Image: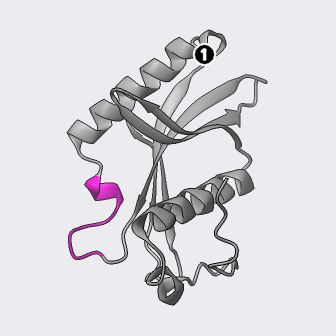
Amino acid sequence: MFHLGSLLTRNRKYNYRHSLRTISPDERGTWAEELAADYLHDKGMKTLARNHYCKFGEIDLIMGEDMANGDMTIVFVEVRFRSNSHFGTGAESVNYRKQRRIIMAAHHYLQQNPILREKPCRFDIISISPQQRSNNICWIPAAFEI
């Protein structure tokens, strides 16, 4: 797996604005997904899959969140990175069409993993914007529904 540790110094201040200009869009996407996964791990989730591709689209992160009753919720996460907000936030860019594609890709993932089919699931969005100095990660749990 490609790690951006050599390109970006990780710190919990999330101040990467200058460094992000020097890497490619693909590397930026990988960095954003790594940052989102780290953030969700800090919140107690575990990674089940990354970058699940199918003919319907891609799911950036598939996480598991333990519930109080001992069961697990499957969390399908769309990660959006925006270097500026001239055209809206990353979360605002997840329109109805993109939501439908994520839902179909999630259905495909669950068909391939029958043991997870009966688990509750939800769709979250993580929007990353490095120029907001105090809060670069905006996590929206249950951002949309089926």
For the point 27% across and 55% down, the residue is 93
The kind of secondary structure element at disc 1 is: loop
For the point 74% across and 47% down, the residue is 44
Which of the 4 image quarters holds residue 115? top right
For the point 35% across and 56% down, the residue is 91
Image side of residue 74 versus residue 81, left or right: right
Quarter placement of the C terminus: top left
Image vertical order of residue 109 relative to residue 132, above or below: above
Q: Quick check: can you spot residue 145?
A: no
Image side of residue 42 versus residue 50, left or right: right
Q: Position of residue 66 (x, y in %)?
A: 73, 33
Which of the 4 image quarters holds residue 142? top left
Identified by mark 1, the residue type is Asn
- Which stretch did the figure color magenta? 85-93
Q: Quick check: can you spot residue 97?
A: yes
2, 84: nearer the viewer: 2
